[in-house]
Image: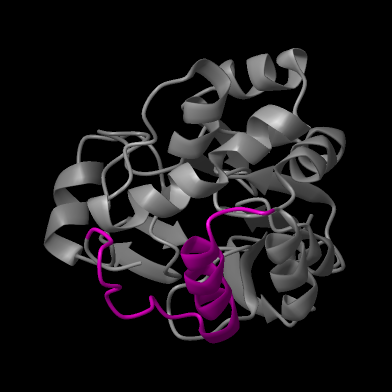
């Protein structure tokens, strides 16, 4: 059975639709359906209709129950600039759905016990932890699972830690590793295959422009979408955009 694992869609419907073309039997989403992108409502509705499992991301919680998104300071102003779209595009029931998503889930896939979480097992919503072997060893050493799948950093990676693995599929809607194509992973027969899918980035940029959101935020988010890299600092804005 092919399991398509996606994360960090961030309201980018064009990217989500492109990744959905990857053949699969089951879909798992590691959170952050919303935030930054122009189509949070359609993305939530698509995932609800197609995913076998969804765990909560920090932006999902923020839109669902009004909590702070907990972004790094340099991204908070971007999140704030697009946040009204979620309120406008999602019904009260859909926001309650986001608020009620589980923060982690354990499933058995192909004979392996797997933990699915947005950020880390110890901090399911907020901790940024890239491919740091020592830090991940400490995170997973006490877990009774063979595979941990995470998102949040928008950086795809796989670590083998003794008898356990940690896999991050990267971001569907906002890659930050220098490759603007939508990222995902496919699990099949115990193996992981990373994939990248080209999509119509300019469609998403045009949708961003049509939101009427802060012009600087739209410009910086558009540059990130086109390049897969964080834009340089902007005068008068906190940190990096």
* In this view, 202 is above or below 72: below
**Percent x, y of residue 216:** 47, 66
Which residue shows up at 25% across the image and 71% down it? 235
Which residue shows up at 72% across the image and 31% down it? 88
* Quadrant position of residue 163: bottom left
* In this view, 37 is above or below 14: above
Near-viewer residue (209 or 137): 209
Q: In the rendered view, does 81 fall on the left or right side of 2?
A: left
Near-viewer residue (39 or 99): 39
* Quadrant position of residue 54: top right
Q: In the rendered view, does 117 fall on the left or right side of 141?
A: right
Question: Quarter of the image containing the N terminus?
Answer: bottom right
Which residue shows up at 40% across the image and 39% down it? 145
* In this view, 9 is above or below 54: below
Q: In the rendered view, does 129 fall on the left or right side of 47?
A: left
Which residue shows up at 50% across the image and 80% down it? 228
Near-viewer residue (3 or 199): 199
* Quadrant position of residue 78: bottom left
Whether the magenta-drawn stretch holds residue 228 is answered as: yes
Number of marks present in the image shown: 0
**Percent x, y of residue 208:** 68, 62
Whether the magenta-drawn stretch holds residue 198 is answered as: no
Q: In the rendered view, does 55 fall on the left or right side of 122?
A: right
Q: Which residues are magenta?
A: 212-238
**Percent x, y of residue 171:** 55, 63
Question: Quarter of the image containing the C terminus?
Answer: bottom left
């Amino acid at each position: 059975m092919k399991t398509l694992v996606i994360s960090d869609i961030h309201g980018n419907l064009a990217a989500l639709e492109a990744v959905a073309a990857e053949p699969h039997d089951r879909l798992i989403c590691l959170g952050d359906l919303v935030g930054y992108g122009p189509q949070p409502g359609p993305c939530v509705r698509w995932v609800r209709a197609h995913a076998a499992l969804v765990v909560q991301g920090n932006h999902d919680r923020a839109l669902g129950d009004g909590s702070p998104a907990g972004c790094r300071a340099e991204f908070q102003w971007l999140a704030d600039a697009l946040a009204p779209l979620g309120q406008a595009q999602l019904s009260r029931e859909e926001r309650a759905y986001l608020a009620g998503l589980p923060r982690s889930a354990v499933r058995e896939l192909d004979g392996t016990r797997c933990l699915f979480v947005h950020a880390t097992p110890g901090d399911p919503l907020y901790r940024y932890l890239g491919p740091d072997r020592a830090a991940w060893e400490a995170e997973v050493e006490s877990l009774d699972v063979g595979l941990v799948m995470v998102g949040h950093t928008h950086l795809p990676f796989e670590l083998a830690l003794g008898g356990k693995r940690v896999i991050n599929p990267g971001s569907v809607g906002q890659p930050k590793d220098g490759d603007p194509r939508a990222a995902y992973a496919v699990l099949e027969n115990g193996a992981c295959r990373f994939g990248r899918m080209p999509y119509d980035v300019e469609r998403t940029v045009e949708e961003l422009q049509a939101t009427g959101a802060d012009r600087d935020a739209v410009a910086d988010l558009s540059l990130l979408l086109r390049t897969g890299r964080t834009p340089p600092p902007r005068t008068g804005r906190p940190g990096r955009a």
